Image (tube, rainbow, N blue to C red):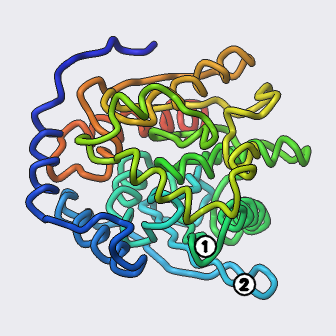
């Protein structure tokens, strides 16, 4: 199910890398985290396609004891009848990204799939170390399951989704539900997921620099996220290291051929399949990490979203209107 490799970087990826180079941004460890977040969001905004209108977009807050978890809810279907929903976690190395950084992606996913989308603004490092983001993600899933009627969504047609660090959280939520014996989600939609933060996979060195996400950036994010090296071994940080993936929801994993994370992402797909989890692996051979949220420059971003929305429609709308 995986496409073959390639030695050619796609021309759109080359164009994106040139745009980024021309920005002349300082390395992450030479600026404050606030500056890094602002620069990341500003650059991402320049690289995205026009923002589509959606019938209903509402910001809200989940109350989790003494903390509050903001979210953004999207629905493009009129009426109050229950519809499928995607619970979405943004990427950004557990340090960058927020509800605005992935707003266009969430709108496109909502509009093209017919599903509602709820994006979660989980706590980020370095202010909140591991496992704060995981705890927020798991809480968000449980909150959604308690509020399906209010949200107007069908608990039997719920997908977990995210990109990069957000994809890590999505599949860790699925694993956490399994560990707790809870009702599983129906699907996992994982864009170039972080799956093994303790591993030294070859692709981290093949594409260590010059392809957007660098090994230096990966190490920077890890320093912000973890308090010690041992935490990287925890399956909540590195789901590839979980001992038993059997019983997880069907997974669609999309990877990029020139991504430092491609080896661990595809190793996770192989381990899921070996555990009997229905798994679809789609590689975009000439692309780089993060390409799906750069659709203003990279046409294949829409192709990847189309893969996701097609699966959502097949699984959630073939037997139900």
Q: Check disc 1 and report the residue beneath it.
A: 123
Q: Secondary structure at mark 1?
A: loop
- Image location of residue 121, percent across then percent down: 55, 71
**Residue at the (34%, 38%) spot, across then down:** 208
Contact, mark 1 vs mark 2 (Cβ under 8 Å): yes
115 or 165: nearer the eye?
A: 165
- Whether residue 148 is visible to the viewer of this picture, yes or no, is no
Q: Residues within 10 Å of mark 2 (few under 14, many from 20)?
A: few
Residue 102 appears in the picture as rendered: yes
In the rendered view, tell whether residue 199 sits above or below residue 164.
above
Towards the viewer: 147 or 4: 4
Q: Is residue 291 left or right of residue 13?
A: right
Q: Is residue 146 above or below residue 3?
A: below
SS label for mark 2: strand
Q: Extreme bottom residue here?
A: 66
Give coordinates of residue 189: x percent, y percent.
Answer: 53, 40
Residue 202 coordinates in the image, percent (x, y): 46, 25
Give the quadrant of residue 262: top left
The image quarter in which residue 307 lies: top left
Q: Residue at x 31, y 70 (%)?
A: 41
Residue 67 is tagged as: 2
């Amino acid at each position: 199910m995986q496409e073959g490799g390639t030695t050619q970087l796609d021309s759109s990826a080359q164009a994106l890398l040139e745009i980024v180079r021309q920005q002349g941004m300082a390395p992450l460890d030479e600026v404050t985290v606030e500056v890094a977040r602002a620069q990341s969001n500003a650059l991402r905004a320049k690289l995205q396609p026009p923002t589509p209108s959606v019938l209903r977009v509402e910001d809200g807050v989940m109350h989790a004891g003494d903390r509050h978890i903001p979210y953004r809810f999207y629905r493009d279907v009129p009426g109050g009848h229950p519809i499928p929903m995607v619970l979405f976690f943004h990427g950004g190395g557990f340090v960058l990204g927020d509800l605005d950084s992935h707003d266009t992606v969430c709108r496109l996913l909502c509009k093209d799939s017919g599903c509602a989308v709820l994006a979660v603004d989980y706590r980020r490092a370095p202010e909140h170390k591991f496992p704060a983001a995981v705890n927020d993600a798991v809480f968000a899933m449980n909150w959604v399951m308690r509020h399906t009627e209010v949200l107007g969504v069908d608990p039997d047609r719920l997908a977990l989704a995210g990109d990069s660090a957000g994809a890590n959280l999505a599949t860790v939520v699925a694993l956490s539900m399994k560990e707790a014996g809870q009702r599983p989600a129906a699907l996992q939609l994982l864009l170039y997921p972080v799956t093994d933060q303790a591993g030294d996979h070859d692709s981290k060195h093949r594409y260590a620099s010059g392809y957007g996400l660098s090994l230096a950036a990966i190490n920077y994010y890890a320093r912000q996220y973890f308090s010690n090296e041992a935490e990287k071994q925890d399956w909540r940080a590195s789901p590839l290291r979980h001992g038993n993936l059997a019983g997880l929801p069907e997974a669609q994993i999309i990877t990029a051929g020139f991504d430092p994370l491609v080896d661990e992402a595809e190793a996770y797909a192989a381990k899921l399949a070996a555990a009997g989890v229905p798994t679809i692996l789609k590689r975009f051979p000439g692309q780089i990490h993060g390409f799906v949220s750069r659709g203003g420059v990279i046409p294949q971003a829409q192709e990847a979203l189309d893969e996701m929305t097609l699966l959502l429609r097949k699984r959630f709308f073939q037997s139900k209107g």
